[in-house]
Amino acid sequence: MKQFFRNNGGLLLVAAVLLAGVLTVGAYILGYDPLSGALELLATPFRAASSAVTGWAQEQYDKSFQYEQAQAEIDALRRRVAELEQDAIAGQEAVRENERMRDLLGLAEQRPELQYRDAAVVRRASSNWTSDLTIDRGTSGGVEAGDCVIDQYGHLIGVVTQADFNSSLVTTILDPTLELGGRIARTDEDAILKGDFSLMLEGLARLSYLPEEARLVTGDQVITSGLGGMYPPGLAVGTVRSLVTEEDGLTRYAQVEPAADINGVQYVYVIVDYGA
């Protein structure tokens, strides 16, 4: 075989050249470029890869755009919800303000000789030794120490014992340090209303120094007497829960359940003038 190529190599080369020439001429006549075809064949996988990368990039862009659009919509919805919540809060405040104004009007109609200032409870303290509230109105709003504080129904809560510029401390009728004149509304008998350490945690007050002939019964209404001129008379304090005889067997006192919800009240009214 080697000898064959050695003897005929020249002829084979010439034949190959001629064949290539014939193919080239034929391709030219038919409009086919062998080099372009080869390049096209080589470029095909790269073109396919480029198309895949372009498609993937477009898909990622579309996803990113859709995500940003969805996020923008979510943010807009959150802002709208926040606005609606603020509107709801403002509406609730307006409703509460209207309720307070109606209550104030009702109190003014019941006791036209009294002048009131509305206030909100901002702090509540109750322990074994004290029972007091802090309200958001003070001397700048016309409140002074010694003013009585009531709820929306006219029930006595306590007395202002310290008035600052924008707030006041209210000592409730359950506190052992508070003492004022009380009266049994049914019998018109006077006594002394004060807090009591042993009763305070039960939410009760004490009506002491009862007349010997006092004819109290469970359910009797207790009001302020107004004796001494320090506090307005006729404010509802509460009702008699029970009558207790002291250990000496001679004196008695009544346990009084306050009419006001002292531990739960949120809005109060301060009597700043009672025409005494």
Image (cartoon, grey):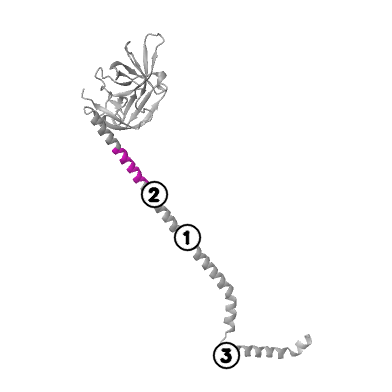
Residue 273 found in image quarter: top left
Q: Quick one: SS at disc 1?
A: helix
Q: Residue at x 39, y 15 (%)?
A: 244
Does 217 sit above or below residue 118?
A: above
Q: Is residue 36 visible?
A: yes
At label 1, the amino acid type is Ser
Amino acid at the residue labelled 2: Val
Which residue has dot 2 on it? 81
Separation of disc 1 and disc 2 at Cα?
25 Å
Q: Residues within 10 Å of mark 1 (few under 14, many from 20)?
A: few
- Left or right of residue 36, residue 157 in this image: left
Residue 155, given in percent of the width and then of the height, sits at 31, 27
Question: Which one is in front in this view, the residue at disc 3 or the one at disc 2?
Answer: 2
Q: Which residues are magenta?
A: 85-98
- Which residue is at the front of the view, 121 or 209? 209
Quadrant assignment for the N terminus: bottom right
Pick the front one: 213 or 179: 213
Nearest to the observer: residue 120 or residue 19? 120
Q: Position of residue 169 (x, y in %)?
A: 33, 27
Is 216 placed above or below 126 here? Answer: above
Q: Position of residue 239 (x, y in %)?
A: 35, 22
**At 44% from the left edge and 57% from the top edge, which residue is drawn?**
70
Q: Which mark is residue 64?
A: 1
The residue depicted at 35 percent of the width and 43 percent of the height is 89
List the residue tagged with mark 3.
29
